[in-house]
């Protein structure tokens, strides 16, 4: 008799559960942890050498002595309607996907696919699902919310073979949305890897993807010979850029000037990194805490210790390596909709953008307008890389406003592209 994961396109209810053996081993490793020493001339607020010892040590002690994973696991299972399903991904074969699916009671609800990035997980949508699916009044746009896990992130089954980057992820997510859930037309939200996956979906399946929203999108400066006006503005940016554009440009310079070391190693030798960070909870904690410090708008949002550790658990549960490896797979892809191709040509799908001031990358408008059909832009005075978690009120309102616009309504009802 075939098991539930043997049949294609047949979702099976899922509850998150980490084996007690791993939890016990984790506590033992935390008890045996060895920490580096800070150099005496490095200030308490100076993160230029990486994660601060005192911060990691405090979190490690809390993880060891007080953090209650079983209680958090129960809360996650109560907050998310989770499933797993096996689909046939064109160009790869069979792959099992984890996803959460929350159906609105509203007949006018729009199907919305929310895709996270690294080092996040499906938990990034935790604070926005309920207000999106069940808004307070009938005049507010409602959504059927689907939150899949990127393979290897959280409870998402990792790809068994190499090559599974955004192109194949996009094909798999399309299968989940259309073939499994029956949503023939839908809208999407993505940041970080989510922006690349959703953009790849829009290129590959324009008949299904009707509009997108991004809180982060990568875009290099345009070649001067293709966009001389944009290049002129960049050269004269101290005089011609808005204050927000200058801030965004500086954030990108900071990122590529000293914060992208993780990207270089994860996109080249992820498995070597995995031997250390996949075996050491302290190592993985330090690796991710640095990113949370650099990318969260810490002036307006301080992550509680439990939230930080649950973030880490979503990658510790699989040893970190599958998440690291996604960078190798992503940057190695070639062809239509691949990472190298995503920002080389224009995408006609209607796009909405939300600018959060501490986001890693949000290029100037004249860069983005060359590659994206932007109809909605909104700037905020707080928020960072994990906007759905940091400022869910702003995030939810932007999704409601953009996806209820006449542009999107027309795209949902119009002829397939």
Image: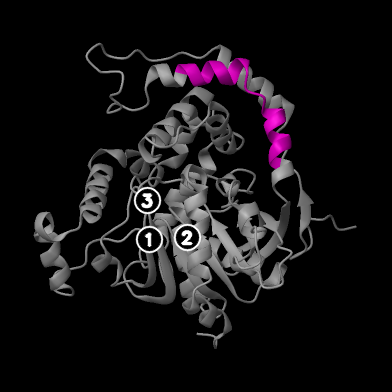
Quadrant in the picture for the N terminus: bottom right
Report x, y in % for residue 220: 26, 60
Q: Residues within 10 Å of mark 1 (few under 14, many from 20)?
A: few
CA–CA distance in space, label 1 to label 2: 8 Å
Secondary element at image label 2: helix
Q: Is residue 5 visible?
A: no
Secondary-structure class at tag 3: loop
Query: Considering only order in the chain, which callout, 2 or 1, is on the residue closer to the N terminus?
Result: 1
Give the CA separation, mark 2 to mark 3. Answer: 12 Å
Marks counted in the figure total: 3
Residue to which mark 1 is pinned: 378
For the stretch drawn in magenta, the main secondary structure is: helix
Which residue occupies the foreground of this view, 193 or 93? 193
Rounded to the nearest angstrom, the CA distance separating label 1 from label 3 is 9 Å
Residue beneath the point at 30% across and 23% down: 45
Dot in front, 1 or 3: 1
Side of 340 where 285 appears, left or right: right
Q: Which residue is mark 3?
A: 356
In the rendering, at what x and y percent does residue 399 appear? 51, 62
In magenta, the rendered stretch is: 57-76
Residue at coordinates 66% horizontally, 72% vertically from top-left? 178
């Amino acid at each position: 008799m075939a098991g539930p994961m043997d049949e294609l396109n047949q979702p099976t209810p899922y509850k998150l559960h980490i084996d007690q053996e791993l939890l016990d081993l984790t506590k033992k490793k935390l008890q045996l942890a060895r920490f580096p020493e800070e150099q005496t001339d490095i200030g308490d607020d100076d993160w230029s050498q990486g994660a601060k010892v005192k911060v990691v040590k405090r979190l490690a002690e809390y993880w060891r002595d007080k953090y209650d994973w079983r209680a958090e696991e129960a809360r996650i299972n109560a907050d998310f309607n989770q499933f797993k399903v096996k689909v046939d991904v064109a160009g790869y074969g069979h792959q099992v996907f984890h996803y959460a699916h929350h159906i609105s009671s509203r007949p006018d609800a729009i199907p919305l696919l929310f895709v996270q990035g690294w080092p996040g997980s499906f938990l990034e949508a935790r604070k926005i699902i309920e207000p999106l699916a069940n808004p307070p009044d009938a005049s507010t746009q409602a959504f059927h919310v689907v939150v899949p896990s990127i393979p290897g992130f959280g409870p998402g089954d990792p790809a068994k073979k190499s090559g599974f980057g955004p192109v194949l992820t996009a094909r798999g997510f399309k299968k989940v949305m259309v073939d499994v859930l029956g949503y023939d037309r839908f809208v999407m939200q993505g940041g970080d890897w989510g922006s690349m996956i959703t953009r790849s979906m829009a290129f590959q399946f324009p008949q299904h993807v009707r509009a997108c929203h991004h809180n982060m999108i990568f875009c290099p400066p345009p070649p001067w010979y293709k966009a001389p006006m944009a290049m002129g503005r960049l050269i004269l940016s101290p005089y011609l850029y808005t204050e927000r554009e200058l801030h965004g440009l500086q954030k990108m310079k900071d990122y590529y000037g000293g914060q992208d070391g993780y990207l270089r190693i994860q996109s080249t030798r992820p498995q070597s990194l995995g031997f250390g960070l996949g075996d050491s909870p302290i190592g993985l904690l330090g690796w991710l805490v640095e990113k949370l410090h650099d990318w969260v708008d810490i002036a307006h949002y301080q992550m509680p210790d439990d939230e930080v550790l649950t973030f880490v658990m979503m990658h510790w549960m699989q040893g970190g390596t599958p998440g690291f490896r996604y960078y190798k797979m992503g940057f190695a892809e070639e062809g239509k909709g691949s990472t190298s191709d995503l920002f080389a040509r224009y995408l006609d799908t209607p796009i909405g953008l939300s600018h959060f001031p501490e986001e890693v990358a949000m290029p100037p408008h004249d860069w983005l307008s060359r590659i994206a059909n932007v109809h909605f832009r909104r700037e905020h005075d707080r928020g960072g890389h994990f906007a759905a978690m940091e400022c869910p009120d702003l995030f939810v309102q932007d999704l409601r406003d953009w996806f209820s616009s006449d542009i999107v309504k027309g795209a949902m009802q119009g002829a397939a592209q």
